[in-house]
Amino acid sequence: MSNTRFLATLLAFAIVSGTHAAVFRRTSRATCPQVTTKPDFNYIPYAGLWYEIERFENAFQQGTTCERAIYEEISVGVVSVTNTAVLADGSLTNITGSATAISPDEPGHLIVSFPGRPDGDYLVLDTDYTNYASVYSCGVAGAFVLEYAWLLGREQTMTQEVMDVALSKYTQFGIDVSQFQLTTQGDTCVYYPEYPFPPLVSN
């Protein structure tokens, strides 16, 4: 992602609650790790409901809990993206956009778009479709490396065995997984909208 687009995306995340994490890291040589996405990624089995299990520390999601991501196919190569969360004051928030595969040679590299906001990269490092998804994005802004990362699961909790596998997809690229923080999920959460989505009622 270009520096300009990445900074614009960062500002969009600053404005909208319920989007995913950003962490600022100043280094003597600001670079993002060279990563590869899942080479045989298929968005069809990836679709459906995912719970955010862990995310990187961030300035814009403080106090939010119960995050979910819901993906549904819109057309060939395009899925809808609905992110939901509970804000610190207990109110519910959600935003809906789309994700598009940019190249058949790199099916795990998606571009996420939300109405009125800049596009952002969404890199699926790996997923087994039924238990975990390791997702990442990174860009450079001046002396800072800006990293986004979230670990998603199909259930509200994840076994340590599965988590170890999912986290290894980051460490193999030199990504510091100690930055991950646990996301609150479970019985204390209110999840809205319901999923599966209720059928539309025609007049």
Image: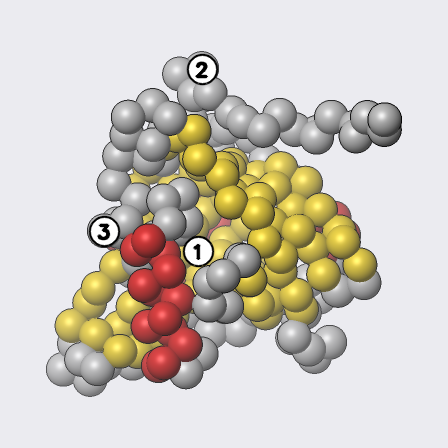
Nearest-to-viewer mark from 3 and 2: 3
Q: Which residue is mark 3?
A: 59
SS for callout 2: loop
Q: Which residue is mark 1?
A: 168
Q: Residue at x 16, y 76 (%)?
A: 27
Q: Could you say where residue 172 lies in the image, as x and y percent from the top left?
A: 42, 66
Neighbours of disc 3 within 10 Å: few (<14), some (14-19), many (20+): few
Q: Amino acid at mark 1?
A: Ser
Residue 55 visible here: yes
Q: Amino acid at mark 3?
A: Ala
**Compared with residue 58, is residue 108 higher up or lower down, i.e. above or below?**
below
Q: Where residue 38 is drawn, which disc sits there? A: none
Q: Which residue is mark 2?
A: 187
Closer to the chain start, of discs 1 and 3, is 3
State the colouring used for the structure image: secondary structure
- Give the Cα distance between marks 1 and 2: 29 Å
* Corner quadrant of residue 98: bottom right
Q: Nearer the viewer, residue 42 or 110?
A: 110
Q: Could you say where residue 118 lies in the image, as x and y percent from the top left?
A: 46, 68
Q: Could you say where residue 143 lies in the image, as x and y percent from the top left?
A: 18, 80
Nearest-to-viewer mark from 1 and 3: 3
**Compared with residue 192, is residue 50 higher up or lower down, i.e. above or below?**
below
